[in-house]
Image: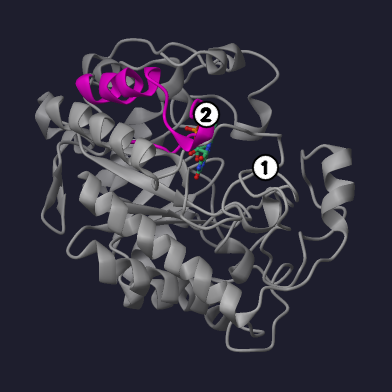
Amino acid sequence: MTTSDRPIFRPLTVRGVTLRNRIVMSPMTRMASPGGVPSEPMDAYYRRRAEHGVGLIVTEGIGVDHPTALGSGSLGEDNMPELHGDAAVARWREIVAGVHQAGGVIFPQLWHQGPIRAHRTGPYPELMSSRPSGLWGPRGGFSTVPEPYLEDMLAPTAPMTDEDIVDVIAGFARSAANARATGFDGIAVHGAHGYLPDAFFWHETNRRDDRWGGTALRERARFGAELVKAIRAEAGDMPIMFRYSQWKQQDYDGRLAQTPAELEGLLGALADAGVDIFDASTRYYHHAAFAGSPLTLAGWTRKLTGKTTMAVGGIGLLNELKDSFAGEVGTVNNVPDVEQRIEAGEFDLVGVGRSLIADPAWAEKVRAGEPFEPFHPRVLAAIH
Ligand SMILES: Cc1cc2nc3c(=O)[nH]c(=O)nc-3n(C[C@H](O)[C@H](O)[C@H](O)COP(=O)(O)O)c2cc1C
């Protein structure tokens, strides 16, 4: 097979946007945007991945235009970017232009931290965080969050009002409009890992009995669906990509859907609202999603929705995200397995996270069959 025939190097067009191959840079927070404005090195950082052949770059999480979108997260994160205000928009315009000059495609990941934002942090420290039912999540989940943070987060707060919910949705829509005006090629929504809108999806953080809640996952999907519709109204014909996950920072073993039928309730509502690409965020891309079938979460997502789908988690690496901060992570060439799955129609795209931080030329090395650079947490200290 010639390189261009290899499944991972086949182009793919979604809503008129052509990706030159199936390799996607997974969204990764880099904390290099003081005051919400990406710093100078972020320009070369994104452009370099495009120059080295990444098909689609999904940016780090970008706080949407809402006062409680960003603060310190569970790990004390800081200096995350925004996409509103003249300075931030101007910097993103330069970053997008650089990626385009290098032949790449780039989507911003729109992010609202919801219940995970530490209270009294971020640009509006006087505000408590936005939580569907005033809950952070259950005590005792399988989690790596530090104890002092957890203690502060466990106390219940006032649930979001109807007006609060409408305001957050409007904030996402404004950021989507800014993304379009800035020249981005599509919109990615962070709907995973316990943030908003995942906090509406998860029964542990959404106990509401109004139209934003319900006992069925399909009912709790409403916030996500309304959000996607509001983004669609601003995004015009741009592709919308939606990341969701079973796992949560509050509980790595947490689950939204116990069965494929439940999952269909969530994904069907999001697809009907206008999602073009699903990003099924897992820690290991190849693990079975439900008992009784070897199919992965990305595999189920594609089968249930028929939409373009991305798999992610552990591509090129031996262990998962939560285990990667202690020391070097060994590399593994699981690309042949990924390619077989693309060929078989299990999923369409692959998200590559830590491998692409460690090695900007990862996509070229896949093409050339060369060994990858291993990920070590110290590479996070600098933007390169
Ligand atoms: C440093 C770092 C920052 C991350 N930040 C985000 C983020 O902003 N948004 C998001 O959806 N996922 C984030 N993730 C998760 C990655 O997008 C990806 O799903 C995860 O690392 C698994 O892929 P990997 O095994 O290839 O690293 C982050 C991961 C890392 C390592």
Of the numbered discs in the image, which one, if any, rests on residue 262?
A: none
Q: Determine if residue 296 is in view.
A: yes
**Do labels 1 and 2 touch, CB within 8 Å?**
no
Ligand 1 within 8 Å of the CB at mark 2: no
Q: Is residue 371 above or below residue 11?
A: above
Front in this rendered view, residue 258 or 384: 384
- Give yes or no for residue 364 being in the magenta stretch: no
Q: Residue at x 37, y 55 (%)?
A: 175
The Cα–Cα distance between marks 1 and 2, rounded to whole angstroms, is 15 Å
Of the numbered discs in the image, which one, if any, rests on residue 73?
A: 1
- Which residue reaches farthest bottom? 210
Where does the image place residue 22, in percent across and percent down from the top left?
25, 39
Could you tell which of marks 1 and 2 lies nearer the N-terminus? 2
How many residues crowd mark 1 within 10 Å: few (<14), some (14–19), many (20+)? many
Where does the image place residue 295, in percent across and percent down from the top left?
46, 56
Q: Residue at x 58, y 88 (%)?
A: 211
Q: Which residues are magenta?
A: 24-51
